[in-house]
Image: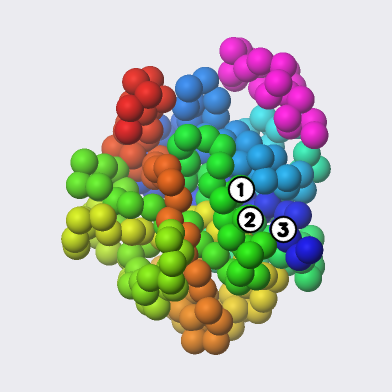
Amino acid sequence: MEEPRYLVIPAAGLGTRMRQAYSDTPKEMLPIDGLPAIQYALQEGLSAGLKKLVIIISKEKEDIRRYFEDKKFRQNMFPHLDEEIHTMIEQCSITFLYQQKPLGEADALSLAKDFVGHEVLAVMYPDNIYFPAPGALLVLKSVFGHYKKDVIALFTVSSAHAEGIGNSGRVRLSHVTGDMYKIEHFYPKGEGYFIPRFRGELRACGIFIVHPHIFEYIERARDSAKTGEFTDIYFRKVMLQEQELLGCRLPGRVYDIGNPKGYELCQHYRNSGRP
């Protein structure tokens, strides 16, 4: 059965929203319940049977590589890690690639082409933390296996959590069945945070499973991003012109820890057990 074997984690971004509050720590290494945020992406992959990881970093984020490759470094940075975490890391085959310039997540993803080749891949942005963890990629893998179509995770944005979610990922949807939707349109990224247009609005996030044609669409969309970062919306819009793109509403909640408020809400959830 055609299914993903690779998990690609783009972790080279500048993290400008978090720099002021946490200038010395990459957002991917910020602690959440005693684990670095990027560990949750690894756990998502393992829960879905994905043991081949491609992590894209920059030279400024060597701590991420050291966390995965140096057990003593891990123990010094996170002294309360149990042996199960070390075993998880040792179970994976991890390739690190370097994005030389901060050109955006679409450019970062393109670097994985030679490693993934013609295989289906899963992608998880490490600042998108799903709870209850893990489970998001397992849900998407099941959907992909059924429909054989590219699928992106959706989650409900409540007014109580909107302030902690960046103003991106807004979509127009048509309902298919149950938690399944067809994505009709991606709206441009805006300023500030995500303000729901209506009760129960669904937002697309950086957790998805896609055929290897993603690399072709990234290259075709590259010239569209003439100014600013080459974000995922550029290639997703090109894909929509030729491919059916599904959205699946996750049963849990996705926290955007790429901004201080989202990180605070995520920590509150882990400390209190309440969303």
| Label number found at residue 130 | none
Residue at x 51% of width, y 73% of height: 245
**Which residue does the numbered mark 3 point to in the structure image?**
4
Q: CA distance from mark 3 to mark 1?
A: 11 Å
Q: Main secondary structure of the magenta part?
A: helix
Q: Nearer the viewer, residue 111 or 142?
A: 142
Assess disc 3: are there few (<14), some (14-19) or many (≥20) residues with their C-alpha within 10 Å of its C-alpha.
Answer: many
Assess disc 2: are there few (<14), some (14-19) or many (≥20) residues with their C-alpha within 10 Å of its C-alpha.
Answer: many
- As shown in the figure, which amino acid type bears the numbered disc 1? Leu
Q: Indicate the quadrant where residue 257 lies.
A: top left
Residue at x 29% of width, y 51% of height: 157
**Which residue does the numbered mark 1 point to in the structure image?**
138
Disc 1 + disc 2, Cβ < 8 Å: yes
Q: Indicate the quadrant where residue 143 lies.
A: bottom right
Residue situated furthest bottom in the rendering:
242
Q: Quadrant location of the N terminus?
A: bottom right
> How far across and how far down the image is residue 224, in percent?
47, 81
> Which secondary structure lies at badge 3?
loop
> How far across and how far down the image is residue 249, in percent?
43, 56
| Label number found at residue 141 | 2
Mark toward the start of the polypeptide (2 vs 3): 3
Residue at x 78% of width, y 70% of height: 118
> How far across and how far down the image is residue 14, in percent?
47, 49
Q: Is 154 above or below relative to 81?
A: below
Whether residue 197 appears in this view of the structure is yes
Q: Which residues are magenta?
A: 71-91
Q: Indicate the quadrant where residue 44 lies.
A: top right
Q: Nearer the viewer, mark 2 or mark 3?
A: 2
Disc 2 + disc 3, Cβ < 8 Å: yes
